[in-house]
Amino acid sequence: MQPFVKSQPSRSGLWAAAAGHNGAVACRCTYVEELYGDEAEAYARGHLRSDELDEDALHERLSCPDTGRRWVLEYPERTGQDAGQARLRLEPT
Ligand SMILES: [Zn+2]
């Protein structure tokens, strides 16, 4: 089991790293369906390509440049200004 890590990114910094990653994170899209917290954000920023961002809803659609699989990054625990823990899940095809 992965330990759950509580992360509380600021809204202003949340998407700052969305562009310009270098693909250093290996593709796990064929055998991972869900990631949480820091690991979810690190995977999204380090590997996935951002397709569509709804910053107000803290909801982002992404896709894998290698396999074309689609992902959704969201913050289901969000309350007010606290974004809570990220959740990255594979979209059913
Ligand atoms: Zn991938």
Image (tube, rainbow, N blue to C red):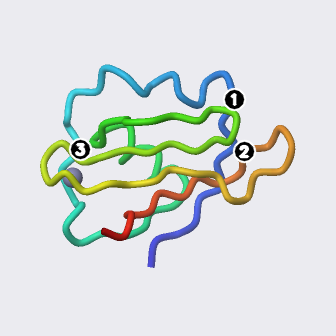
Secondary structure at badge 1 equals helix
N-terminal label among 3 and 1: 1
Q: Quadrant of the C terminus?
A: bottom left
Residue 15 in percent (x, y) is at 53, 28
Q: Are there few (<14), some (14-19), or many (20+) residues within 10 Å of tag 2?
A: some
| Structural distance between the alpha carbons of marks 2 and 3 | 24 Å
Determine which of the numbered discs, if any, sits on residue 11 in the image.
Answer: 1
Residue 88 in percent (x, y) is at 47, 57
Position of 15 with respect to 6 (left or right) is left
Q: Tell me the amino acid under the disc marked 2.
A: Ala
Determine which of the numbered discs, if any, sits on residue 83 in the image.
Answer: 2
Q: Residue at x 20, y 35 (%)?
A: 23
Residue mark closest to the camera, 3 vs 1: 1
Position of 20 with respect to 80 (left or right) is left
Q: Is 92 or 5 nearer to us in this picture?
A: 92
Q: Residue at x 24, y 48 (%)?
A: 64
Q: Quadrant of the N terminus?
A: bottom left
Of all residues, the one furthest to the bottom in this rendering is 1
Q: Are there few (<14), some (14-19), or many (20+) residues within 10 Å of tag 1?
A: some
